Amino acid sequence: MTVSNNTAPYWDPYDNELRRSPYEAWRRLRDEAPLYRNDRYDFYAVSRFDDVMAVSLDVENFSSAKGITLDSIGEEPQFASMIEMDPPHHDVLRSVVARWFTPKAMSRLEDRIRKLCAGYLDPLVGQSEFEIVDAFTARLPVMVISSLLGFPEEDHDNLRIWSDAQVHRDEGAQTRSAEAVEDSRRLQEYYWNVVQARRQDPRDDMVSQLIQTDLTDVDGTVRRLGDIELMAMMMLINVAGNETVARLLASAALVLSQWPDQRRELVEDPALCVGAVEELLRFEAPSPTQGRYVAHDVELHGEAVPAGSKMLLLTGAAGRDERHYERAHEFDCTRRIDRHLSLGYGAHYCLGAALARLEGKVGLQEMLARFPDFEVDPDEVTYVQTNTVRGPATCVVKPTSS
Ligand code: HEM
């Protein structure tokens, strides 16, 4: 739907047209309805930078333990992973995996990621056009995460398809399709089999190590992760890390076709790609919406929000908040960003932040090394249909010579 200035500010997370061009709708929310109420889908939303940050930090009042996507908030998750838990339980599980994802641990992957990029991008050189999501951006992260988790290469394509189905929603649909539910079952079965296999025959991989790690529970008991906890953790890492990075790199192609001066700067000085990734995260947040369950009555912007409500954090809107960023609607890869919220904030700050940054930097550098000049027709770009992830589902890149 189109948002006109004569109507009340409106945000519909299931509307594909709005998802494609959300920025005017989000500006109106920030300016006119900083606490937005949607009666149709029964949720509240905050969109200003300060509000999204404050709500992210307030885990007492804004809980993740009853679902974090609009279609699931209010239900106890079947297999809760740590992203659907509040401290202190959340912190116990996070402490088990955190050491695998530190910037230092991730930096060891840089050469491997560069080689993977070359393997996907080299065959595209010389082509008059290519669809970059299928050829590159959706393949890279699944390969990186699946290798990290120790999954064999021949399974990677299936894992990508099943993972994508976890976040896909048909247009207007509020819940997952029967096909997506079936893909979810396949993914769970796959993880279950991996856990059983590694218990029998440990290898030098993350799953085997996680199986053998002692954790101290909230009540002081020392124990190890159970099968369900292991599966939920693998599922979370896989789904959280694949879709998002795929969209980040695809958005990079689109954005850099629209800001050619910025692209030239990055081609001339590839070291700027580090900052460009932060700016991309701010400018086109791949995970633009987080969800919370309101655990206690609260007041925001002078209005009461009753316990039991659903609250959306419009992280993507916060990234364009003029109250926090000068020239918020300009893409500037040399911008000095003090902070952004696009990798979350507080207890649930993205576990894979260092990996996302590394894949973003290397992916961008390798792309631009081969395709310094290119065009993308924005009207041809299609968007993924999910109410959690945003970015191109397909994006045709046409290399040009300057
Ligand atoms: C551009 C890429 C990425 C973006 C934009 C992104 C975004 C986010 C955001 C916004 C959150 C907070 C969710 C919330 O507060 O409810 C989050 C959490 C998380 N992300 Fe990422 N992410 C990215 C890449 C990755 C990667 C590569 C991994 C792989 C390990 C990953 C794993 C996770 C996990 C496990 C959590 C939950 C952390 C917790 O509950 O403590 N993410 N991510």
Image (tube, rainbow, N blue to C red):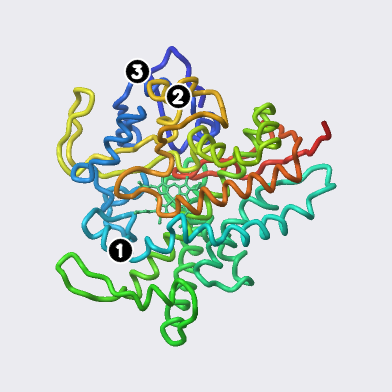
Name the amino acid, label 3. Glu
**Category of crowding for the residue at label 1, using alpha-carbon neighbours closer than 10 angstroms: few (below 14), some (14–19), many (at least 20):** many
Residue denoted by label 2:
25
Instruction: Residue at 20%, 33% (x, y): give it.
Output: 305
Can residue 239 be seen by looking at this rendering?
yes
Name the amino acid, label 2. Ala
Residue 333, percent from left and from top: 57, 32
Q: Could you tell me if the residues under marks 1 and 2 are in contact, i.e. CB atoms within 8 Å?
A: no
Residue 270, percent from left and from top: 65, 41
Viewer-side residue, 18 vs 353: 353
Q: Is mark 1 within 8 Å of ligand 1?
A: no
Instruction: Residue at 21%, 68% (x, y): give it.
Output: 217
Residue denoted by label 3:
32
Q: Is residue 187 above or below residue 33?
A: below
Q: Is mark 2 within 8 Å of ligand 1?
A: no
Residue 83, percent from left and from top: 34, 54
Q: Quadrant of residue 216?
A: bottom left
Name the amino acid, label 1. Leu
- Disc 3 to disc 1, how far (Cα)? 40 Å
Can residue 78 be seen by looking at this rendering?
no
Which quadrant: the C terminus?
Answer: top right
Disc 2, SS: helix
Q: In the orientation shown, which residue stands out farthest toward the bottom?
A: 200
